[in-house]
Image (cartoon, rainbow, N blue to C red):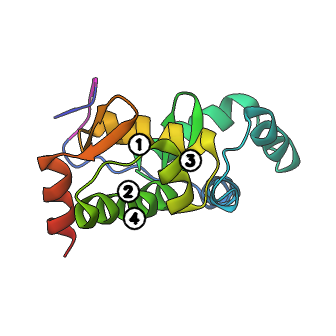
Amino acid sequence: MKKGKTWILKDHKIIIPDDVKQQIDRLESKILNYYMQTPLMSELEVHAFENKIPKDKLIQYLKYLVNEGKIYVIEDNYIHANIVDECRIKLLYELYSSGKGITIAGFRDLINGNRKLCLLLMSQYDNEGMVARDNDLRYITEKGKKLLTDKN
């Protein structure tokens, strides 16, 4: 059976030791605690050092969290999936209910975030095809409308 770019046995199960699972959970919590900010890699490295996680393992753990859908990596920035999803819903409702486009500044006010985070999130939403850009405005796409109606 093929998974990603490799082959695995059909009944293969990944078993993560408890101590590693705890390290991964703490790393995920650390990223979640940044809420509307994005941690610098140096901050994640300090966290790893304090929790006795070697740098190569930190990278593996981050990749694991991305693959599990717990965090997003957007332009080398790590953002917890809860934040990405929460802001996605707010944006879709705003675009759907207003019938108008939204600027980055308008999105920033909507989610009470900073400009950097808003640009990263919009980049993600652009790539997902849920919004389309026309000059400074983003508009909901048919895919975005479907995402919104599927959530209800």
Of the numbered discs 1 and 2, the one sitting upstream in the chain is: 1
Q: Amino acid at mark 2?
A: Arg
Compared to 124, does 11 lie above or below? below
Q: Which residue is mark 1?
A: 67
Residue 144 image offset from top left, x and y in percent:
20, 52
The nearer-to-camera label among 3 and 1 is 3
Q: Residues within 10 Å of mark 4 (few under 14, many from 20)?
A: some
Badge 3 element: strand
Q: Nearer the viewer, mark 1 or mark 4?
A: 4
- Given this view, does label 3 or label 2 mark the residue nearer the observer? 2
In the picture, residue 150 is in which quadrant?
bottom left
Which quadrant is home to the N terminus? Answer: top left
Circle 3: residue type:
Ile
Q: CA distance from mark 4 to mark 2?
A: 6 Å
Q: Secondary structure at mark 2?
A: helix
Q: Give the prevailing secondary structure in the magenta stretch.
A: loop
Q: Circle 3 sits on which residue?
A: 79
In percent of width and height, residue 45 lies at: 79, 37
Cα gap from disc 1 to disc 4, whole angstroms: 24 Å
Q: Quick check: marks 4 and 2 in contact, CB under 8 Å? A: yes
Quadrant assignment for the C terminus: bottom left
Q: Amino acid at mark 4?
A: Lys
Q: CA distance from mark 1 to mark 2?
A: 19 Å
Residue 7, magenta (yes or no): yes
Looking at the image, which residue is at 60% across and 61% down?
112
Q: Hey, what amino acid is under mark 1?
A: Asn
Along the line of sight, the residue nearer the viewer: 90 or 67: 90
Name the residue nearer the viewer: 51 or 150. Answer: 150
Q: Residues within 10 Å of mark 1 (few under 14, many from 20)?
A: few
Q: Quadrant of residue 26?
A: bottom right
Residue under label 2: 88
The answer to whether 42 appears left or right of 85 in the picture is right
